[in-house]
């Protein structure tokens, strides 16, 4: 498909486990974004990549969260030692470049921590 | 901090009528705005965007109006159809561009009455 692809679509795991979420952006999009959406809420910005570089990681909720992007394409968001408050939908978006370009979103990974 | 907000959490309209969804933003330095539509279980879908050097922009059945004097944004949907039922978010982009991500409001749930 031509859109942003995220996997898995759903993930249920036990508290304390590590999880890895994957995002495959639209081909040719250099900018990639991760957001978190809690139930019935708007989106919370987490981190942004331009190419493989993330200039500012301060939006990540805690040091249990990390993200990387390799080859200017696929990105992974890793949450270590998951907590129940990490339960949310994690959305990835990509755009042609930073700034005044619309971001196009995937359908997200719904993460549930038991 | 500054954030984007919405005037009404739920809007109910008759099929065939026009819908107007409002948004107030507080960061006067924001220069790019986007409207998204989100259906249940899906990621936000780009509808239309507008830059701060414009007051109005039209798309297919949609119009976005920007009033910088009162920091107000609106989305007008003409001849509303059942498929328009969704949550609509406005989002603003600060002048820093991609590194700061988009700031989203909490969303307006548009309900179409038959």
Image: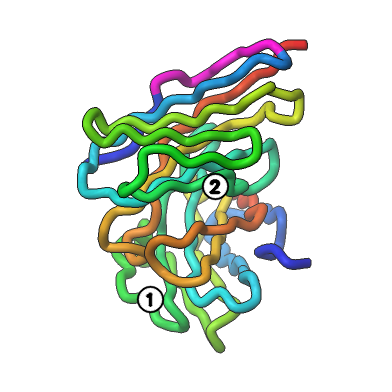
Question: What residue is shown at x 67% (from left), y 37% (from top)?
Answer: B39
Circles 1 and 2: CB distance less than 8 Å? no
Q: Quadrant of the N terminus of chain A?
A: bottom right
Q: Position of residue B27 (x, y in %)?
A: 23, 42
Mark earlier in primary sequence (1, 2): 1
Q: How is the image coloured?
A: rainbow
Q: Residue A87 has which mark?
A: 2
Residue at image location 38% in from the left, 76% down from the top: A54
Q: Which residues are magenta?
A: B7-14
Q: Residues within 10 Å of mark 2 (few under 14, many from 20)?
A: many
Mark nearest the camera among 1 and 2 is 1
Instruction: Give the CA distance from mark 1 to mark 2.
Output: 24 Å
Front in this rendered view, residue A94 or A52: A94
Q: Under tag 1, what secondary structure?
A: loop
Residue B10 on the magenta segment: yes
Q: Residues within 10 Å of mark 1 (few under 14, many from 20)?
A: some
What residue sits right under mark 1 in the picture? A54
Residue A114 in sight in this render: no
Identify which residue, A23 or B28, lies in the foreground: B28
Q: Residue furthest bottom?
A: A71
Q: Chain of mark 2?
A: A
Residue at disc 2, secondary structure: loop
Do dots 1 and 2 share one subunit? yes
């Amino acid at each position: 498909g031509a859109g942003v692809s995220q996997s898995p679509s759903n993930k249920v795991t036990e508290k304390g486990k590590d999880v890895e979420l994957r995002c495959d952006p639209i081909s040719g999009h250099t900018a990639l974004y991760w957001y978190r959406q809690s139930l019935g809420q708007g989106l919370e910005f987490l981190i942004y990549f331009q190419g493989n570089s993330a200039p500012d990681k301060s939006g990540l909720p805690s040091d249990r969260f990390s993200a990387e992007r390799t080859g200017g394409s696929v990105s992974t968001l890793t949450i270590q030692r998951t907590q129940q408050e990490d339960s949310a939908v994690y959305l990835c978006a990509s755009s042609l470049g930073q700034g005044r370009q619309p971001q196009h979103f995937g359908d997200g990974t719904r993460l549930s921590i038991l | 901090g500054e954030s984007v907000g919405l005037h009404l959490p739920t809007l109910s309209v008759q099929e065939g009528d026009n819908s107007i969804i409002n948004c107030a933003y507080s960061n006067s330095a924001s220069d790019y705005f986007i409207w998204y539509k989100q259906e249940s279980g899906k990621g936000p879908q780009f509808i239309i965007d507008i830059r701060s050097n414009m007051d109005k922009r039209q798309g297919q059945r949609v119009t976005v109006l920007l009033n910088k004097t009162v920091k107000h944004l609106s989305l007008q949907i003409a001849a509303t159809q059942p498929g328009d039922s969704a949550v609509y978010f406005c989002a603003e982009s600060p002048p820093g561009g991609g590194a700061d991500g988009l700031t989203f409001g909490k969303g307006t749930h548009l309900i179409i009455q038959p």
